[in-house]
Amino acid sequence: MKIYFYLNGKILPIDKPAVQINDIGILRGYAVFDFMRTYNGQIFHWDDHFKRFVDSAKILGLKIPFKKEEILKSINVLLKKNKCQEASLRLVLTGGPTDDGMTYKKPNFAILVEDIYNFPKKSYQKGVKLISSEHQRVLPKSKNNNYIWAIKMQATKKKKGAMEILYTSQGKILEASTSNFFIIKGATLITPKNDILKGITRRVVLRLARKFFRVEEREVDITELESATESFITSTNKMIMPVVKIDDKNIGDGQVGKNTKLLMEEYQKYIDKN
C-alpha cells in the first residue's frame, strides 16, 4: 500500500483529508485522468500519456495547473517517498470547488501511486472471456471519470466469469470498459477506429503489427465476431490479453491463436528494449 500522494504541489499522507466535498469532480464526476506504469523505474511512454491527459483536459475545458516538467519531477519524488521503483501511476484533474454544482473555477490536480496488478499467467496462456453490453462512453475521446456503467456491470461480469465488458452500440463494436479491442481474420488485424479512447498500448501494438499483418482501423460490426479467428484486448496493465470467448460464443477454436502469441512476444520484446 502506498502511503503518500500528490495534490496541488504538495506531497501528502494518503489518509489526510484533502479535496473539498463540493469539488465538481465529486458532485458531478467532472474530471479526467490518465493511467500509466513504470518499467525498471521509468514511465512507459510518458510523453504519449501526458499528451492524452492534456487532450482529455481540453475536451472538458479544464486547465492543468502545472507544467509537464514539474509533474514529472513530482512523480519521481513521489515514487521515492513511497519507496517503490515499479508502480502504477494515476494523474487526476477535477474541475475543483463549485458553489452551484454546475460551474467551477480552480481545478484540483493529484497524482496517485498504486501497486501494479499482475494478472494470472493462466489468463495469458488460456485466454479470457468478455461479456458484451450496449453502451457508449460519454465524450469517448477523453479519458474522463465517468465509469458508472462499467462499475454497475462489475457484479454481472464477475457472475459470468468474464475479464472485461465489451461495449457495443447500434450493431458496432467499440471498446472494452478499460481496454481496446482487436480481432484477427486470417492475416488481417482489425480494430475499431471511431467513438473510442485510443490507448497508448493500442498504438504500440498497431505499430508492431504492421510488420506482420495487414492492419485495418475501421468500424467493426458485431457480426464479424463470427468470422474472427482470434481476438485480444490491450491496456497499460493488461498489455495484450488474449480473448477466446465473448458471451457464450467462442472466438475461432476457443484457443489462444498463433498470431496473438506472436504479438504478445513482440510486445514483450518492445518493453524489454525500451
Image (tube, grey):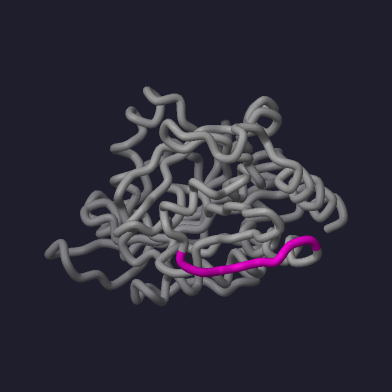
Q: Is residue 9 above or below residue 40?
A: below
Q: Is residue 121 above or below residue 87?
A: above
Is 74 in front, or is 63?
A: 63
Name the residue furthest right: 273
Decide whether the magenta segment is chiefly helix, strand or loop.
Answer: strand
Instruction: Estimate the x, y position of residue 17 in percent, counting from the top left.
Output: 36, 42
Instruction: Estimate the x, y position of residue 142 in percent, counting from the top left.
Output: 42, 66
> Does residue 26 appear to the left or right of 128 in the view shown?
left
In the image, which residues are magenta?
Answer: 212-219
> Does residue 202 appear to the left or right of 131 in the view shown?
right
Identify the image quadrant of residue 61. bottom left
Q: Is residue 201 above or below residue 166?
A: below
Is 16 in front, or is 194?
A: 194
The quarter of the rendered structure image containing the N terminus is: top right
Residue at position x 49%, y 46% from top?
226
Q: Is residue 216 magenta?
A: yes
